[in-house]
Image (cartoon, helix red, strand yellow):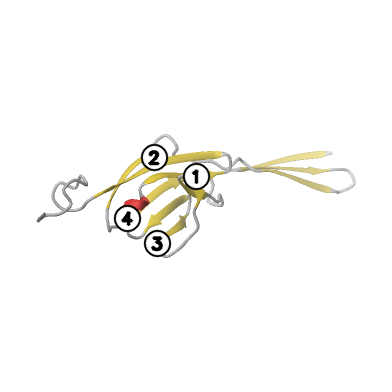
């Protein structure tokens, strides 16, 4: 019996050739996860009426993620959509609104990344206070 190993990240391929010339292939996939879990910006401020983007990097370009807002699964719409670029996964809010502020979770396999998205007013101060310039 001959035993050949072929290692290709992130999969381990084990090929066994027996005396009967039968081939067996065993593929072991690495678990889905994040490669930037420690360095990702988890507290994000976005200006009202502007585009807001939450971003994370997965360990494998084939990894699919799910996005949640306050525990509710998000689906793509005109207001919010998901993008995949290589190993980068993004949640894009086209026009930030006060109702968009909250807790967002990106889930890859059994791993989760939690983001806190806050809205800020544009213009002077940008702190969300005193949003009118001329108040009567």
Residue drawn 45% across the image and 50% down it: 88
Dot in front, 4 or 2: 4
Instruction: Measure the C-alpha gap from mark 1 to mark 4.
Output: 19 Å
User: How much space separates mark 2 and mark 1, taking CA atoms?
Assistant: 20 Å
Residue pointed to by mark 4:
97
- Front residue of 68/92: it is 68
Residue 7, image quadrant: top right
* Numbered disc 2: secondary structure: loop
Label located before the other in sequence (2 or 1): 2
Q: Callout 4: 10 Å neighbours few (<14), some, many (20+)?
A: many
The answer to the question of whether label 2 and label 3 lie on touching residues, with beta carbons closer than 8 A, is no
The residue depicted at 60 percent of the width and 40 percent of the height is 31
Please say if the residues under marks 4 and 2 sit with CB atoms less than 8 Å apart. Answer: no
Q: CA distance from mark 2 to mark 3?
A: 24 Å
Q: Nearer the viewer, mark 2 or mark 3?
A: 3
Circles 4 and 3 in contact, beta carbons < 8 Å: no
- For the question of whether residue 35 can be seen, the reply is no
Point out which mark residue 71 bears.
1
N-term mark: 2 or 3: 2
The residue that appears at 43% across and 52% down in the rendered structure is 90
* Residue wearing tag 2: 40
- Which x, y percent locates residue 29? 65, 43
Identify the element where label 4 is drawn: loop
Residue 8 spot, x, y in % from top left:
61, 44
The alpha-carbon separation of the residues under discs 4 and 2 comes to 23 Å
């Amino acid at each position: 019996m001959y035993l050949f190993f072929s290692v290709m990240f992130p999969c381990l391929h084990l090929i066994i050739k027996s005396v009967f010339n039968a081939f067996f292939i065993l593929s072991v996939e690495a678990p889905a996860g994040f490669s930037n879990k420690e360095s990702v910006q988890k507290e994000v401020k976005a200006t009202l009426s502007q585009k807001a983007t939450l971003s994370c990097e997965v360990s494998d370009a084939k990894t699919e993620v799910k996005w949640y807002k306050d525990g509710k699964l998000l689906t793509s719409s005109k207001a919010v959509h998901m993008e995949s670029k290589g190993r980068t996964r993004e949640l894009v809010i086209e026009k930030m609104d006060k109702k968009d502020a909250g807790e967002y979770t990106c889930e890859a396999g059994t791993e989760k990344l939690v983001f806190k998205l806050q809205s800020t007013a544009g213009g002077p101060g940008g702190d969300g206070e005193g949003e009118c310039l001329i108040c009567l």
